[in-house]
Image (cartoon, helix red, strand yellow):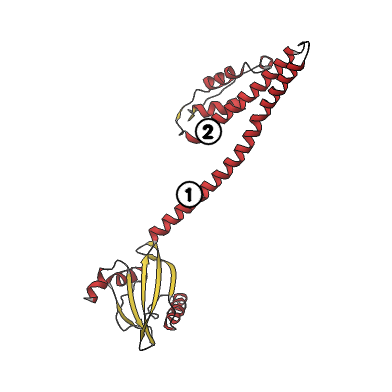
Amino acid sequence: NLRSILNTFQDSVWLINAQYELIDFNKEFFKNYKLAFGVRLAKGKNIIEMLPSPELQTLWQERYQAGLSGNHGKYEDSYWVDKELRTYEIKTYPIVEDGQVTGLTIYARDITQQKKTEDTLKAQNDELSKINSELDRFVYSASHDLRAPLMSVRGLLNMIQIDPDKKNAEQYLQLMKASVDRLDHFITEIIHYSRNARMDIVPQKINFHQVVRDSIDSLKYMEEAEQVRSEIHIEETHEFYSDAGRLLIIFNNI
């Protein structure tokens, strides 16, 4: 019955005596040990001597000795098993008979997928923390840049109210328009930034003549734009593919 129970475990279980000799093991441990080290286990064999390297022999002798001294152990190791790096949580439990530690029961659980999930969650949490930090800085900066033109408009409205002759009203209105234009431009930039972060890239064949013309047309009503002379020279030797909407924003910024 005990043999049947051990062999139904999907985790590795093995028992050793005080001389590091194998008392028993289940099929999972036998299979994984052979895949990892190319060794066929046998009862009565010294498990330390079957390890392939002096470094592993020293490591496991220290762990077994700590267990044989009566201490429970918990370790985490990674081994190449069947050409795949797998991570195991390993626990050692002293076998006590008549008050004396006569051996160890060792239990190894494959936690490879758990570690991958933990690493993925950690990476996502780190990314979320980075995004939150960037959002805090963005909100602070945006609120300042949004308030500045509004405060300017409010101040100009006050100037109009206290101006008895209203002779400077036209000048104040022009200054207010400039502030509103700055505010509109900044809000547009925020919208573009938001769209860029959320929208997928849609590549298509680019007509640079059309993109440049659209960019110039969208900016021709800006202040003093009429003083700018545009000369367009485009040499296309190969087809170019990109996201037309984002490319237009780039040209507008330039």
First in residue order: circle 2 vs circle 1: 1
For label 1, the SS is helix
Percent x, y for residue 57?
Answer: 44, 78
Amino acid beneath label 1: Gln
Give the numbered dot on residue 26: none
- Assign the C terminus to one quadrant of the image: top right
Q: Could you tell me if the residues under marks 2 and 1 are in contact, i.e. CB atoms within 8 Å?
A: no
The quadrant in which residue 148 appears is top right
Residue identifier under label 1: 124
The answer to whether 238 is drawn above or below residue 76 in the figure is: above
Percent x, y for residue 55?
Answer: 47, 75
The answer to whether 84 is drawn above or below residue 172 in the figure is: below
Say if residue 241 shows up in the picture: no
Amino acid beneath label 2: Ser
Percent x, y for residue 111?
Answer: 39, 62
The quadrant in which residue 47 appears is bottom left
Residue identifier under label 2: 194
For label 2, the SS is helix
